Structures are given as structure tokens and as C-alpha cells.
Image: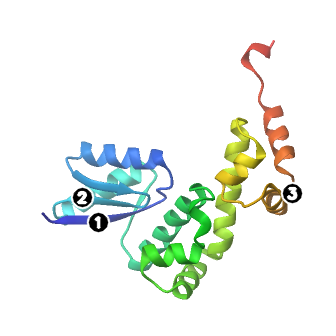
Amino acid sequence: MKTSHIYIKNMVCERCIMVVRQGLENLGFQIACIHLGEAVIIGELNDERISLIQEFLKQSGLELIEEKKLRLIEHIKSLVIDYARSGYQVQEEKISSYLCRHLEHDYGYLSTLFSSFENITIERYLILQRIERVKELLIYNEQTLSAIAFQAGYSTVQYMTSQFKQYTGMTPKEFQKLFLNRRKFIDRLC
């Protein structure tokens, strides 16, 4: 059976996957699979069906990517996000090897392409993704710094703390304290 791949910009989380799946199914499409930045639809897509998809994606804050290089950049972003959220156990493989294995391109080409379109290196983009992951886990306030470092792909708490401070201007504990002080328990509002 014929399948059609569509590539989607701004698709960055599990909620995006759910929105795309539900929206495409509501439009009558059969989905083979959906990943960050990509959906595989069973059947061929004509101009009318593509227009339906574009309109739905636009209403959802997403966008259909048609240019090949832009699709590749979005694929790089989604793989970096997956890599950053996978935790340290997966990250024993370097990001360069991980991307080359998944995208079947030379890392030099991927790096140059990404930097030319995004004005940031893949490595820096990965660091920013890790920092955001650390912020998210700190806000939940459910884990130790060691567990957070491990989940965000850092080998040590010290390395995570150093990089976090370099990019945010504060330590993880200072960030956590600042954020948690902003929130008030609803039973203590009066």
C-alpha cells in the first residue's frame, strides 16, 4: 500500500503528536505512524488533500514543510529534542553519530546546513534543549539534582550546574527557588 510522508514545522512535543494524529484522523486520513516533525499517511496525497492538511496545521499553530532542506532542518531539531530528552544512557553515543545514523548524511553537511538556516550550531541547540529539560524537571520539584542531571544527559551534577549557570546566570537551585517562590499555594492566598 502506498504511503505519503508529510513534514511538519513546530511539532516539538507529545501533545503536538496527539493534536496532529487526532486532526488528521478527523479529516479522514489513515495514519501509519507519527513522529516529531513527521507523519506517514496511508494513501496518496493530491493538491486538495494537501490543502486540507495545510489548513488544519495552520489552525493548530503548525506548518507543512515542503522544501527539502527545511524538512531536513526540522528533522535535525526533532532528533536533537529526542536525544536531549532520552537521558544519559542513550547519550553514550555522540550527537554527531546519532544524527548521521538517523539521517544518513555526513555530519559536516548537517552542521553547516543547520547553522546557515538557524544561526546556531547543533551543539548549542542541544545545550539549550538540555537546559530547558533541566528547568522543566526543576519546576516539578520531584527529583534530586543527580537524577535531573542524569535525565538531561549530563554525566555529573557539577557539569550540569556549570552549564546551567553559564546559560541562565543562576544555579539550578537558585532557579528552582526563584520559580517556586513565584507560585503560591491556593490555600495560602488569604
Q: Do the residues labelled 1 and 2 touch (CB within 8 Å)?
A: yes
Q: Residue shown at 45%/83% (left/top)?
A: 105
Image mark for residue 5: 1
Q: State which tag comes first along the sequence, 3 or 2.
A: 2
Q: Earlier in the sequence, mark 1 or mark 2?
A: 1
Near-viewer residue (48 or 125): 125
Q: What residue type is labelled 1?
A: His
Within 10 Å of disc 2 (Cα), the crowding (few <14, some 14-19, many 20+) is many
Q: Which is more toward the observer, 138 or 87?
A: 87
Dot 3 corresponds to which residue? 169
Q: Establish if 57 lies above or below 94.
A: above
The part of the image, by quadrant, that contains residue 96 is bottom right
Residue at numbered disc 2: 41
In the rendered view, tell whether residue 12 sits above or below residue 143: below
- Residue 171 lies, with reference to residue 139, above or below; the image says below
| Whole-number angstrom distance, CA of label 1 to CA of label 2 | 6 Å
Answer with left or right where residue 156 lies relative to residue 21.
Answer: right
List x then y, in percent, for residue 87.
61, 56
Q: In this view, does 149 lie to the left or right of 94?
A: right
Q: In which quarter of the image is the N terminus?
A: bottom left
Q: Is mark 2 on a helix, strand or loop?
A: strand
